[in-house]
Image (spheres, grey):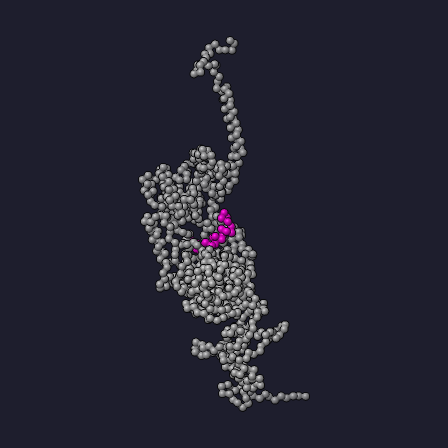
Amino acid sequence: MKGIDPDLKPQRNWRGEAGLRVPFYKRSWFSALIALFLLALVAAFGAYSIVVAPLRQEAEKFDLAELRKLESASIIFDRNGEEMARLYVLNRTPIGIKEVPQHFIDALVAQEDSRYFQHNGVDYIGLARAVWLNFQAGEVTQGASTITQQLARQTFQLMEKSYKRKILEAFLAQRIERHLSKSEILELYLNRIFFGLNFYGVQAASRGYFGKDVRELTIEESATICGLIKSPNNINPLRHPQRALKERNHVLDRMVQEGLLASDEAERLKLKPMATAPQSSDPRLSYIFDAVRTEVMNLVGEERASIGGFKIYTSIDQDLQRKTEESMQKHLKTVEQRQGYEHQTFEQYRGIISDYRARLKRGEIDPTTPKPKPEYLQGAAIVMDNKDGSVLAMVGGRDFGDSQFNRALDSLRPAGTAFTPFVYAAAFSSPGVYPGSKVDDKPFDNKRVQIGAMEGILGEWGTEMDSPKWSMSAISLRESLVGGRNAATMYLGERTSMQLVRDVATKAGISTPLSDYQNLFLGSSEVRLSDMCLAYSNFPTLGSRPKKLHVIQRITDSEDKIVHQVSSDDIDVVQSMDPIAAYQTHTCLVEALHRGTGSPAVSDYKLGEFPCAGKTGTHYDFKDLWFMGYTSSITCGVWTGFDKQKTIYPGAFSNRVVLPIWTEIINASSTAYPATEINPPDTAERIELCRKSGLRATDYCYEKIKGPDGVEKSIRSTYLEYVRPGTPIDGYCTLHTGEGLPSEIASFQHSASLNTPDAALIPDSSKWAHIEPVRMRGVTVIGMDPYNSAIAVPKASPVNEDGSPVKKAIPVDPGEEPTDVPTLKLAPPPAMKIEL
């Protein structure tokens, strides 16, 4: 037939004789394959154009200078602009790659990137493996990120889990490899990445987990740290030692597989326990610097804080800070040296920690055994500026390395009797109540106090002294607060209203919940020392206080641009207490410090001669001790106690333990922050009261007092009280009838009685002594009173240059020459000549 090759032989196959064989490139399946290939090529080109090319271009936009912008050290300045310290806001200490031992680098590359020194930033073999495993899983479960890719991701925050991010990361890694050496990349990587807890960079991790510099790490310690990288918080050896042990051994196996460690050496190291010896904190930190770092983080955010390089201007007074720390250590050590002291001491804990670390290193104790917690006596103190709430000094504990818990800012402890001034301030806020008002001073019925396990014993319902006594009569509110009369305070609290006391304390600055029961009045509620300082600052400022405490005044960046400036709103004061009530409480606290429960400050601890006031605070069973006090310029609070409440020692009143600390701090502050007299509110009315009767004073309110030299002197037994206008104060003193009068006044009255037809009006006459004189109840001058005739001012007594009183002339009968009074003889006046 035409068109058929006669030599063409039919082919046979298993199907039988076949027809003519068509070339494969003419077959339909080949055409389809070519079409699919071309389609895939077009798709790939389209994908590259749409997805990959833009990502490559995007990778070129990143500023590689950011790789070297690790957090720079920030400089902390005191309130006078003097440098205090340089530290990192994040816990990071950059180091050079030469300080990292070779076995650490071997462990790192074996675990994270075995082909690190061969690839150009992307491990294509590892990438193909990850793609296949992810395809099988149906989701992204495996990564193939090289060390360079991880550095790119950490630096530029490429955290999205997607193939798009992976491609961008790969391009960026290749770009990094073109610009930096392998050693430079390793150094930047090890200084940047997070190793769990608050450890950024390998040096912080080395110190934090093993208490040593990175150059001192052993092979197994290096393997432990490298094993943390994939999940730092979940493998943390301090919290999860078994997980960390498993990962450490896996890293050692990888080192063997990569030929970086001998097999027998790895097996020997794997037998070692997971022994950590953590250095709990950066040795450059203290409670005050940690508070600064925390406040910076809150103000600028962690992301910006990670850049560092800030200039941080604080309110801290370095001299006062140093004195506060020294005084705290000195006096608490004295308490621990007290005979019969039964608790752990600071020095004993040093020995316990040394022994713990030695035994851990020798493998004698389980590596999961936690570090012993300090159980020694702790203390805290805050000194604040009354005008703006800036912190001048702060102590949060005795050793920041032992415990980072800041007891000055974060601890909640019962205030004890340091809370009682707010009970009195609440009472004085009520109409008709003033420090001269009376309250019962007698034993309190314990059965009436149903909440708080209060027993009415020493330091609670009695007084703050070893042998509590009650007067069994009504006493003034002033004497009750000054003398720490706790039973009288309870009676006053009940009479005042629990809700009013809570309202006054809360508005004053106490932010924690307060008790709903009677034990509120004696400070059973837990409060912060920082809140108590704010609340006490109402008393020297007539009821106004700063809104909050702050340490940082201003923050600038490396280019001196202001990042944060304390706002005027933050330092503005708020009126949070009735001015008259605040001043009345203040006058009581002045006496509480100088002649009440705080009097040892004057007699024993050498309190300076400047205006100041304060109140002791002893909680039930001597478990928490406070002293809160102030001058016109500053407020200072001191607390001491155990982290787990227990009796410090029987009879540990606050005026024996914390008052010496407070006194030294307040004395140290007096030069830089002078104390001035605190004046009463303009709206208050001044009256003079007799200390003995509590009634309005008369001219006869004197007492005979023997001085140190044994000489008996007449002392005016009165004091000035400032009360709310309209306060009813009826009656004048009838207890004093002249027996305590100074001799010159008594002799003047005696002489006057002999020459005055109205001698019966002189109360010295026994005939009329039982009759109270009729006295004026109101002012005698309406309007201006330039000579203070309505409310007289205290009169000055003339004295000679040597301080002795000036003798006064007294009237005598004609011809009578007194023997004890010098005669004054005057020459006759000259004759006057009058010219007309």
Please name whichever residue, 114 or 179, is drawn nearer the observer in this view of the structure.
114
Please name whichever residue, 135 or 319, is drawn nearer the observer in this view of the structure.
135
Residue 757 place in picture, x, y as percent: 58, 86
Judged from this view, the residue extending furthest toward the top is: 1
- Magenta stretch containing residue 415, yes or no? no
Please name whichever residue, 315 or 489, is drawn nearer the observer in this view of the structure.
489
Dominant secondary structure of the residues highlighted in magenta in the image: helix
Residue 445 place in picture, x, y as percent: 46, 65
Judged from this view, the residue extending furthest toward the right is: 836
Judged from this view, the residue extending furthest toward the front is: 447
Q: In the rendered image, is residue 756 in sight?
A: yes
Q: In the rendered image, is residue 560 in sight?
A: no
Q: Which residue is drawn at 39% across and 55% down?
A: 374
Residue 75 place in picture, x, y as percent: 47, 53
Which quadrant is the C terminus positioned in? Answer: bottom right
13 w.r.t. 515: above or below: above
The answer to which image quadrant residue 835 occupies is bottom right
182 w.r.t. 4: above or below: below
Along the horizontal axis of the image, is 394 left or right of 361? right
- Magenta stretch containing residue 301, yes or no? yes
Residue 407 place in picture, x, y as percent: 45, 57
Magenta stretch, residue numbers: 284-304
250 w.r.t. 689: above or below: above
Q: Which residue is drawn at 42% across and 48% down?
A: 204
Q: How many badges with numbers are in the image?
A: 0
